[in-house]
Each structure stands twice: as structure tokens, then as C-alpha cells.
Image (cartoon, grey):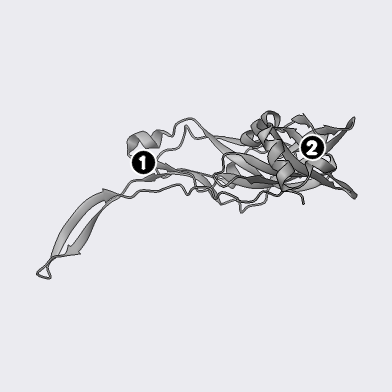
Amino acid sequence: MSTNAQIELVGRTDEETGSAACERLRAAGQTPGVLYGNQDDTVSVKIETGSLRPLIDRGVRVLDVAIDGETQKVMFREVQWNTFGTHVHHFDLLRIDADQRIEVEVPVELRGTAPGTNSGGQLEQPLHTVRVNCSAAEVPERLMIRINHLEIGDSITVADLDLEGDTEATLDPTTVIARVVEIREELEEEIGEEGELEPGLIEPEVIGRAADDDDDGDGDDE
């Protein structure tokens, strides 16, 4: 499903640019940003953080913005966070045409419970976003995948995605998004003090999910 999110931006004055001024905006509950592209002037903007943050948390990539009585279609080009990744420090919006095709990363959301996990299997999700090519007006907000049919050994690949309209995934169709694997217990052999092989502990293989990197940059205008 494509998003039709819309927000209203306010232009920043000269007194509201620069690192110190941007810090004051954040303290007042506003987030600074810039709007640029499509051969138009770059504009320093701001928005109430309470209006911006929900869109970012939802993974919205393309949206409509209203500024000075004019509505434009834009996409998030960059979002910069504080050191701990808890607060948005700055955002960049790129103007785009509604009918142009763009490539964008779309979050993948798994729905349901894989029955294979109740039979001794473990669910793995190697891919958390999928890059797609689509028109700017039809960017999916997220790709929802039902996994309530996955038994041990089953998988869902990019080829299994149900993409709407003329949206196309740019990845290899055989790329695995989610799968259920058997938890194998392997007997580790350790060398004892007298040089004899001794059985080690039996431990299940643990597959971890890598943590997201925190971007550390304020992106403030000087």
C-alpha cells in the first residue's frame, strides 16, 4: 500500500540557522531540515517534532509537504540522529515528480507465527528491507509477509513478494527474506589434559540479529 502522508513545513529565518540556533529549535520541540532538488532553491525548514517522528518511525519514504501554500512531493534523502539514536537531529527532503520512477528501500514486516517454530525450528529473517523500483506516487509504506505456512525447511524469497502495480524488486528473485531452519545440536570435541578427545557441551546454534548502526551527525546549517 502506498502512502499519502502529508506534513506542513515552515521556512527557517536567518536567525534559525547554524548549530546553536538548531539546538534551540530542538529544545523547543522542533526539528530543523532542508528541502532541495528539482532545480529549485534549497530551503531551510523546520517542523514540530511530534509531527515528523511518527512518519519516520512508520518507515515512510515518500510524502507530500505543504510550504508557503504550495504542496510538493518529496522523499526522505537523509535522517540524522543523535549519538544514542533516540532523537532526530536533522532531515533532508528531496523534491521529486509524482510520475518519475525511483528506487527506495522498503521495510519488510513479518505477520503471523511460523508453525515450524513449534516443531523445533527457528525463524530467521536475513532481509529486513527490500529495494524496489516504482513510481514516486506509489511507494509502498511497508511490505507485509505472512509466515503462518512456514514449516522447517521452508523459506520466502523476493520472488514470493506480492507487489502492487508496476512496482518491481531490484534484488535477485532467489534472495531469501525469511526461513525456518532446524536447530542443530552439534557435539564439540575438546582435547583433554592428557591429549585425549573429550566430548564438549551440546549447545544449540544461536542466530543473532545485528544491531542497526547509529548515525552520528547533526547536519546543521552553518
Q: Quadrant of residue 89?
A: top right
Picture coordinates of residue 78, whole percent (x, y): 70, 47
Residue 131 vertical position relative to residue 195 in the rendered view, above or below: above
Residue at 47% of width from left, 32% of height from top? Answer: 148
Q: Nearer the viewer, mark 1 or mark 2?
A: 2
According to the image, label 1 marks what residue? 121
Query: Is residue 153 visible to us here?
Result: yes
Badge 1 element: strand
Farthest residue toward the left? 194
Q: Amino acid at mark 2?
A: Ala
Q: Amino acid at mark 1?
A: Gly
* In-image side of 147 versus 95 (left or right): left
Quote the CA–CA distance across marks 1 and 2: 40 Å
Query: Is residue 140 visible to us here?
Result: no
Residue at 60% of width from left, 45% of height from top? Answer: 82
Which quadrant is the N terminus positioned in? top right
Dot placed on the residue nearer the N-terminal end, 1 or 2: 1
* In-image side of 206 versus 23 (left or right): left
Residue at 75% of width from left, 42% of height from top? Answer: 33
Picture coordinates of residue 185, whole percent (x, y): 27, 50
Disc sitting over residue 137 in the figure: 2
